[in-house]
Amino acid sequence: MPVALTVAGSDPSGGAGIQADLKTFSALGAYGTAVLTALTAQNTRGVTGVHAVPAEFVGLQLRTLFDDVTVHATKLGMLGTAEVVRAVATALAGRPGGPVVCDPVMVSTSGHRLIDEAAVDAVRTALLPVADLLTPNVPEAAALLDRPPATDLDGMVEQAHALLALGPRAVLLKGGHLGGDESIDVLVTADGATPTRRPRMATTATHGTGCTLSSALAALAAREGAGDWLPLVERARDYLQAALAGGEGLGIGSGNGPVHHFAGIWPG
């Protein structure tokens, strides 16, 4: 059985964080495990509070899990503090959790800051070198590089290459913030840059899209390995596209509702 691990915060509304990750793992045929880094108070309209798990206990969760369970791929989401970032990086240094997909969660969709400057620096210096695939959006890439956000595809490619130089083995820079009729992401590896395109969805059900894409990549890597990220990226984007298309039909909340992680799987 392929086993995927999410190391992330909790979302009580179920659309993002570990809840979204575990749903995605299940939808894509991976057994889901989870290490909690933070509790959040949030709904589809925004985040009202964050309560961090102590770094020592995050490390203990990871060590205890790895002592017993073989994990084939790991997804990292909201880590919150510099101490937690370093504890996670230390636990993953020997790759006990297989290939690492790092989604550097820094700001919620509603604009709530989820990570402080010390934690951003810890991600930059301690976490990126243990990441096999980094999946920032345009604002997150800019924060990691301490540069203005990219405004077009050429700028995304340049910033993705700059992130690659910080240590991850591949970078998937997500261009959803740029607008336009297409949602264009770019995958950059040592072999070059490859854009990947999907039609932009007209929907309010966008809560948890970043979590869902990165956990889909981890689930697929757990099942098939991570020798070539491009086919996994294309399949993960197809999964997310279907989840976005089905999200409004769920009717959850009154803000930015969740995507439908089981679109095409649940009856109806």
Image (tube, grey):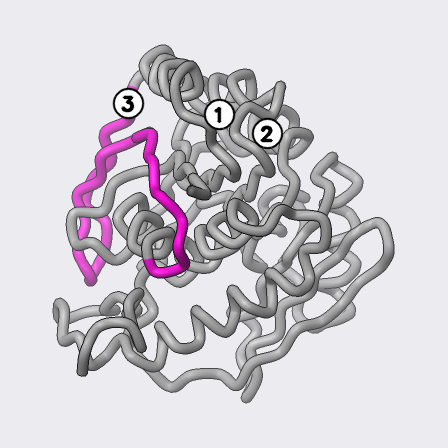
Q: Quick one: quadrant of the N terminus?
A: top left
Q: Quick one: quadrant of the C terminus?
A: bottom left
User: Where 134 sits versus 206, above or below?
Assistant: above
Camera-side residue: 108 or 93?
Answer: 93
Magenta residue span: 27-53
Camera-side residue: 57 or 150?
Answer: 57
Q: Does 40 lie within the magenta span?
A: yes
Q: Earlier in the sequence, mark 1 or mark 3?
A: 3
Residue at 37% over, 41% down: 114
Q: Position of residue 124 (x, y in %)?
A: 63, 33
User: Where 44 sits versus 35, above or below?
Assistant: below
Direction from residue 132 to residue 77 in the image, left or right: left
Q: Are marks 2 and 1 in contact (CB under 8 Å)?
A: yes
Q: Does 30 lie within the magenta span?
A: yes
When asked about the image quadrant of residue 267, the answer is bottom left
What residue would you read off at disc 1? 85
Q: Position of residue 86 (x, y in %)?
A: 52, 19
**Circle 1: residue type:** Val
Direction from residue 192 to residue 99 in the image, left or right: left
Q: Residues within 10 Å of mark 2 (few under 14, many from 20)?
A: many
What residue would you read off at disc 2? 127
Please tell me whether mark 2 sits on a helix, a strand or a loop. Answer: helix
Which numbered marker is on residue 53? Answer: 3
Residue at 37% over, 51% down: 25
Direction from residue 52 to residue 142 in the image, left or right: right
Q: Position of residue 225 (x, y in %)?
A: 62, 46
**Circle 2: residue type:** Leu
Please tell me whether mark 1 sits on a helix, a strand or a loop. Answer: helix
Q: Residues within 10 Å of mark 1 (few under 14, many from 20)?
A: many
